[in-house]
Image: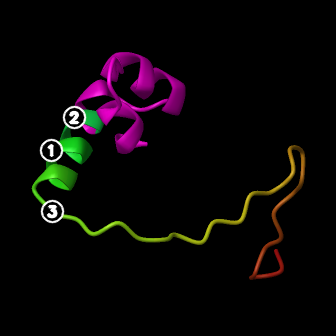
Amino acid sequence: MWAAADEPGAVVAEVARRADVCTSVVYKWRREARSSAIEPGFAFVVVEQPGSMPTSASGS
């Protein structure tokens, strides 16, 4: 997402709104990425279907 904020003509507030995060977070991520403080990587995410009920590990 921070890459979208780096595109020519991008408005950080619009990028943040689309991602549902605070504008300051996008600025922070962009600053850290530019300074190589963070390495780009992959995060595995499982997205559940709307309305699906989570199962309880404790069985309660």
Q: Which mark is residue 31?
A: 1
Highlighted range, magenta: 1-25
Main SS of the magenta part reads: helix
For residue 30, side relative to residue 22 (left or right)? left
Per the image, label 1 sits on a secondary structure element best described as helix
> What's under tag 2, amino acid-wise?
Tyr
Vertical order, 21 against 10 (above or below): below
Tell whether position 39 is magenta.
no
Q: CA distance from mark 3 to mark 1?
A: 9 Å
Q: Residue at x 23, y 30 (%)?
A: 24
Disc 2 crowd, CA 10 A, few/some/many (<14, 14-19, 20+): some
**Residue 17 percent across, percent down from the top left:** 46, 21
Rounded to the nearest whole Å, what is the CA distance between mark 2 and mark 1? 6 Å
Q: Residue furthest bottom?
A: 58
Which element carries disc 2, helix, strand or loop? helix
| Rendered position, 14 above or below 47 | above
Residue at position x 25%, y 46% in the image: 29
- The residue type indicated by label 3 comes to Ser
Q: Which mark is residue 36?
A: 3
Q: Which residue is mark 2?
A: 27
Contact? badges 2 and 1 (CB < 8 Å):
yes
